Amino acid sequence: MPEEMPGTGGQATLPQTVFFGIFGYLAAYLMQTYRLPTAATAIPLALAGMGVIVGSILGGRVADHHRRLALFALSCWGSGLLAALVFMAQVSPWVTVALAFGAAALARISSAVTPTLLLELADNSRTTATGLFTVSNQLGVFGGASLGGLMLALGGFPRVGLFCLGGVGHRCCGDPTQGKRLGRISCADCPTEGHNCH
């Protein structure tokens, strides 16, 4: 198994942490900050959740791009920044929903990019790679819900946003040039004819 494999699994965990950190506490944030009744949070949550669909579509395009790891890193930073603004920019509930939509879309890009990276690195251990991706997703669910709750108890909703930003900034974008096999596809596989992939 190549040595980059564990780090690649971690790249899936933290975007998932951001996603569940946002949607685990978004309804409570809307109710507390903007005094929305419980029933009124259904439509904002549904609209914000549509970012998952957009992110999955964008992730498919990013996974085929010859600079996919750099784009993946940018999406990590973007999702973390928007997640922080979700819980800190108290402008209006609809601005909050728009920020959550963007954060969800950017975080969800990992759903297409990470399996591609894992399967390329796995060689003959593709079953292990698939299992690693599943485990990393579950760790992200646990981290977003439990650690997000801890941050909420320690410093309120702004601390949840900073937790999301700090998490993806620390790991996902720590080394955006981590190996040519991770960041770039070979010239033989490059979709752009005549493109210099080196």
Image (tube, grey):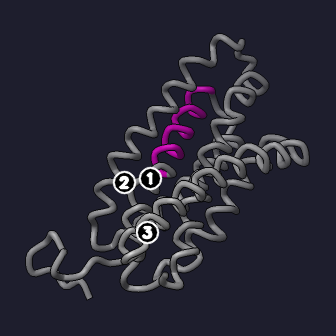
Please tell me the numbered disc located at residue 111: 1
C-beta proximity under 8 Å, tags 1 and 2? yes
Please tell me the numbered disc located at residue 182: none
Q: Of the residues tagged 3 and 2, which is closer to the observer?
A: 3
SS category of the residue bearing label 2: helix
* Residue 128 position in % (x across, y down): 49, 67
* Residue 48 position in % (x across, y down): 52, 32
Relative to 109, say whether 65 is above or below: below
| Neighbour tally class for label 2: few under 14, some 14-19, many 20 plus, Cα within 10 Å | many
Kindly report the secondary structure that dominates the magenta region of the rendered protein: helix
Please tell me whether residue 186 belongs to the stretch shown in magenta.
no
Q: Which residues are magenta?
A: 93-106
Q: Along the line of sight, which residue is nearer the eye, 162 or 62?
A: 62
* Residue 34 position in % (x across, y down): 72, 22
**110 relative to 143 in the view: left or right:** left
Q: Amino acid at mark 2?
A: Gly
**Residue in view at x 79 percent, y 50 percent:** 147
Q: Of the residues tagged 1 and 2, which is closer to the observer?
A: 1
**Residue in view at x 60 percent, y 55 percent:** 80
Q: Give the mark, 3 or 2, whose residue is nearer the N terminus.
A: 2
SS category of the residue bearing label 1: helix
Q: Give the mark, 1 or 2, whose residue is nearer the N terminus.
A: 2
Disc 1 and disc 3: Cα gap in Å?
Answer: 12 Å
Q: Give the mark, 1 or 3, whose residue is nearer the N terminus.
A: 1
Which residue has dot 3 on it? 118
Please tell me the numbered disc located at residue 59: 2
